[in-house]
Amino acid sequence: MIGTPDMCRPYRKAYVVKYLGVVPYEDALSQQETLRQLRAEDKTPDAVLLLQHPHIYTVGRFRGEEDIIAPPENIPILPTSRGGSITYHGPGQLVGYPILDLRANGLSIHKYIWKLEEVIIRLLKDFGIDAQRNDTYPGGVWVGGQKICSVGINVSCHITTHGFALNVNNDLKYFRYIRPCGMRGISMTSMAELLGLPVPFDAVVHNWIHLFSEIFELRRVTNTMLSVEEATTV
């Protein structure tokens, strides 16, 4: 498991991060908006929410409904403000929502997305999985001809919301009811499918935090992290 040397580098800008467990999608949207407003008012540092969602399909701001095939009736479909098309979230998938001030970090949208992808690519490499970007289908991470991580973001007043979804141990059958990310003839994969066994989820979370700190050149702090309740009462 990777260590956490980021705590020892005080010259870096601070950010806060927390793994929240399984969170309903609508609650995560509310939490992101609260943190976005606080970040825009400079009342909190950059933050990242890491979590899992119950089963849900989400549709991008400009497209996605045309890529619904026949999803199970008991799984909701929710429109969102992120980019991209339709995708699936469910237990066993690591979802990350960075709330970052791009201007304060000197990042363009393109560079921000590149760095998000780079975190995933290096994380997968640490687990023995050779992953890469796909120039034909930008915004995500691939292993060969299969997609393993989707990226869809929103930027408002240079503050980011939404983020990435990495397939770790989730059941891939739910992707069969849609055309993920609007792609035809493309299949999704997961870390568990590629490795042939379940992956320790806490190790994925731990390594993601370390790599995010390194690649974004941020210093993780723990004593100022806002909980969901704290974020809504500041």
Image: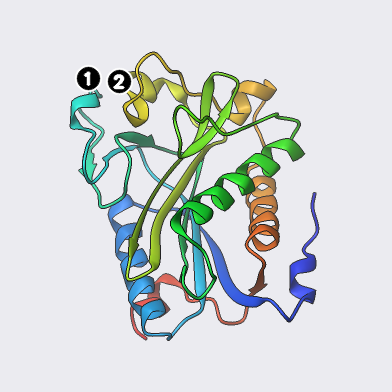
Residue at the disc numbered 1: 70
**Is the residue 43 above or below the residue 132 in the image?**
below
Q: Indicate left or right for 34 with 213 as reference.
A: left
Can you give x and y, in whole percent of width and height, for residue 190 in the image?
56, 28
| Numbered disc total | 2
SS of the residue under disc 1: loop
Can you give x and y, in whole percent of width and height, for residue 220 in the image?
65, 71
Q: Label for residue 54?
A: none
- Residue at the image position 74 percent from the left and 68 percent from the top: 6
- Residue at the image position 29 percent from the left and 34 percent from the top: 86
Q: Residues within 10 Å of mark 1 (few under 14, many from 20)?
A: few
Which residue extends farthest top? 185
SS of the residue under disc 2: helix
Q: Amino acid at mark 2?
A: Tyr
- Residue at the image position 79 percent from the left and 53 percent from the top: 2
Can you give x and y, in whole percent of width and height, for residue 215 in the image?
67, 58
- Residue at the image position 47 percent from the left and 60 percent from the top: 108
**Is the residue 148 above or below the residue 4 in the image?**
above
Q: Amino acid at mark 1?
A: Ala
Residue at the disc numbered 2: 177
Q: Which of 5/201 is in front? A: 5
Q: What's the coloring here?
A: rainbow
Can you give x and y, in whole percent of width and height, for residue 130 in the image?
70, 29
Q: Residues within 10 Å of mark 2 (few under 14, many from 20)?
A: some
* Mark 1–mark 2 distance (CA, rounded to whole Å): 5 Å
Q: Which of 1/161 is in front? A: 161
N-terminal label among 1 and 2: 1
**Is the residue 124 above or below the residue 231 in the image?**
above
Would you say the residues marked 1 and 2 are in contact, meaning their CB atoms lie under 8 Å apart?
Answer: yes
Q: Which image quadrant: the C terminus?
A: bottom left
